[in-house]
């Protein structure tokens, strides 16, 4: 009798087990690494669970049926990710990322809708109220984390019109790298976050 009771409990136990997460997931891209061919990105699923993925040069990406790359995806894009299956808490390997719906332009530059009131960029640099110097410990297209001379870390937003100077010359944002020592002129946003007006590095920083 006890054997039959045990057998009856087996289906119930199987039903009670949490389902394995699917290897095909749709959601909203939250963030991604952009400075290296390998890195990580995160996606918020429709049930608000956040999944993290790792990618490399073999991970494919496309938008509007055209080949793209992880670095060119935008936070806010609705994506479909094909990955290795596994527990929700694990860091999965992404085989392919398909953009199902592009993010609205206002989502691509954080808080851009609040910045129309600002002065021209040259005057902002002249009126910068904050300055920081240190080494970049983390970096993506929207912000960087600076390890300052005092030993602390400061998160700094990167604006669409942030000016970058390398060795005294204006350069593209892509020239910025982790482990670089930089000097930053900055100010506060309406939400009291720090945003960079100018980032400077190179020989000009040497004593």
Image (spheres, grey):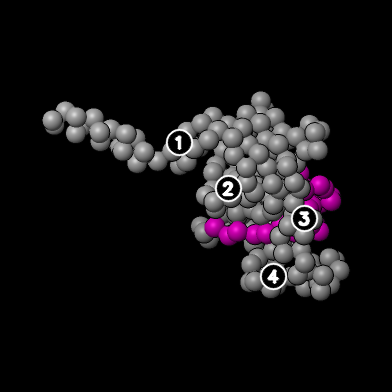
- Which label sits in the foreground, 1 or 4? 1
Q: Which residue is mark 4?
A: 189
Query: For the residue carrying disc 2, how many other residues have a C-alpha within 10 Å: few (<14), some (14-19), or many (20+)?
Result: some
The quarter holding residue 93 reads: top right
- Which label sits in the foreground, 1 or 3? 1
- Which label sits in the foreground, 3 or 2? 2
Q: Disc 4 on helix, strand or loop?
A: loop
- The quadrant of the picture occupied by the N terminus is top left
- Image vertical order of residue 7 relative to residue 194, above or below: above
Q: Which mark is residue 58?
A: none
Instruction: Give the residue drawn at x 16%, y 28%.
Output: 3
Q: Which residue is mark 1?
A: 20
Q: Earlier in the sequence, mark 3 or mark 2?
A: 2
Q: Disc 3 on helix, strand or loop?
A: loop
Give the Cα separation between the discs numbered 1 and 4: 42 Å
Q: Earlier in the sequence, mark 3 or mark 4?
A: 3
The quarter holding residue 161 reads: bottom right
Labelled pair 3, 2 in contact (Cβ < 8 Å) = no
Give the Cα separation between the discs numbered 3 and 2: 18 Å
Query: For the residue carrying disc 3, how many other residues have a C-alpha within 10 Å: few (<14), some (14-19), or many (20+)?
Result: few
Q: Position of residue 10 (x, y in %)?
A: 28, 32
Q: Which residue is mark 3?
A: 104
74 and 86: which one is in front? 86
Give the Cα separation between the discs numbered 2 and 4: 29 Å
Task: Indicate yes or no whether the magenta region holds residue 71.
Answer: no
Give the Cα separation between the discs numbered 1 and 2: 15 Å
Labelled pair 1, 3 in contact (Cβ < 8 Å) = no
Predominant secondary structure in magenta?
A: strand
- Image vertical order of residue 121 relative to residue 65, above or below: below
Q: Which residue is mark 2?
A: 45
The magenta segment is 153-178
């Amino acid at each position: 009798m006890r054997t039959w009771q045990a057998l009856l409990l087996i289906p119930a136990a199987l039903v009670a087990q949490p389902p394995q997460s699917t290897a095909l997931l749709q959601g909203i891209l939250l963030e991604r690494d952009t400075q290296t061919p390998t890195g990580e990105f995160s996606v918020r699923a429709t049930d608000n669970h956040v999944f993290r993925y790792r990618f490399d040069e073999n991970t494919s990406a496309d938008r509007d049926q055209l080949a793209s790359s992880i670095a060119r995806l935008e936070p806010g894009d609705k994506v479909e990710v094909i990955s290795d299956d596994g527990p929700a808490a694990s860091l999965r390997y992404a085989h392919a990322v398909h953009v199902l719906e592009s993010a609205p332009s206002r989502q691509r530059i954080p808080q851009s809708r609040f910045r129309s009131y600002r002065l021209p960029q040259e005057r902002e640099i002249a009126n910068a109220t904050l300055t920081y110097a240190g080494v970049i410990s983390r970096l993506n297209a929207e912000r960087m984390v600076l390890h300052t001379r005092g030993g602390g870390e400061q998160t700094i937003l990167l604006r669409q019109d942030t000016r970058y100077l390398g060795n005294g010359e204006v350069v593209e944002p892509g020239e910025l790298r982790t482990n670089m020592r930089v000097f930053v002129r900055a100010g506060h946003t309406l939400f009291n976050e720090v945003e960079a007006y100018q980032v400077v590095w190179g020989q000009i920083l040497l004593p």
